[in-house]
Image (spheres, coloured by chain):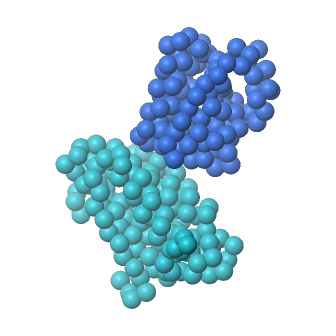
Amino acid sequence: MALRATYREAAGVTVVDIGGRITLGEGSALLRKTIRELLEDQRTLILLNLADVDYIDSSGIGELVSAYTGVKNRGGSLKLLHLTKKVHDLLQLTKLFTVFEVYSDETIALRSYR
Amino acid sequence: MSEDSKHLEVTLETQVESVNLAEEMCLRVAEAAGFGEDDCYRIGMSVREGVINAFHYGNEERPEKKIHLALDLTPEKMVIHVLDEGRGFDLGSVPDPLAEENLLSTSGRGIFLMRAFMDEFKVIPGRTGGAEIIMSKKLPPPGSPGTNGTSHGAAPKQES
């Protein structure tokens, strides 16, 4: 399934709802493009809602890390919301749980930016 | 190769689409062989990572080079070979992606994932001068919870 991404504003944070597979090629490229657009628009508080992302490969992991560091370098903050089991396990395996702030409740996630 | 073994070989172009194609092909074989959902996920991911490695690092995304994918299905295990036409590489020189200094690296997790998801994993010099990744997964015993209900070697179920 191709990746799709839409974004919305909530409590001063840009919530990006992503669905599909973040993999080498179009999936990774769309995530990169979305983050670039948000940063160009001075939106640096970003919450990636991965509820509908059922698959990420190493390229997708690399793109998530790139998004995280890109936002952080601009003085912002990128956090993750609603991981599926496969994505959760993959982030745990690659020790990226120690890097990303991960939430399972959107309200609590939004409050964490204050 | 014994009579109980099956062999499948395909030559792929050095392009992004080959990654999905290889994954889909191996998944069909794995499902037909009786691997359960979790093992199929691990096999599919490992094949993706092997072909990404050949595409990006081995063949350096050069379209005139090929990626050679081979599958051997024996009564005991599924063996996957991914061979590129690059310059080869030394496994020992691959950085550990779990090391503190590499956690924020945007690449270098493919080998780690293949090692984690497969039962056996090695890299040898390939016959084309590049690297050959060889990895395998043991077949689950017939009827075990890890199987998808089909018997080993059975054809994929047809949807009615």
In-front residue for pair A2/A88: A2
Q: Is residue A89 above or below residue B128?
A: above
Query: Looking at the rendering, which quadrant does residue B72 occupy?
Result: bottom left
- Residue at (41, 40) in percent of width and height: A25
Q: Is residue B146 above or below residue A40?
A: below
For residue B56, side relative to residue B113 (left or right): left
Work out which residue is located at the far left of the displayed protein and give it. Answer: B64
Report the number of numbered marks: 0
For residue A47, side relative to residue A63 (left or right): right
- Residue at (40, 58) in percent of width and height: B22
- Residue at (54, 36) in percent of width and height: A4
Q: Can I make out residue A99 in this image?
A: no
In-front residue for pair B31/B98: B31
Q: Is residue A75 above or below residue B95?
A: above
For residue A14, side relative to residue B19 (left or right): right
Which image quarter holds the N terminus of chain B?
bottom left
Measured as percent of width and height from the top left, residue B33 is found at 52, 75
Measured as percent of width and height from the top left, residue B61 is found at 28, 43
Measured as percent of width and height from the top left, residue B97 is found at 52, 41
Measured as percent of width and height from the top left, residue B139 is found at 55, 75
Q: Can I make out residue A3 in this image?
A: yes
In-front residue for pair B75/B97: B75
Query: Looking at the rendering, which quadrant does residue B107 occupy?
Result: top left
Work out which residue is located at the far top of the displayed protein and give it. Answer: A42
Indicate the colour of chain A: blue
Q: Which chain is cyan?
A: B
- Residue at (49, 43) in percent of width and height: A2
Query: Looking at the rendering, which quadrant does residue B99 occupy?
Result: top right
Work out which residue is located at the far front of the displayed protein and give it. Answer: B160
Which image quarter holds the C terminus of chain B?
bottom right
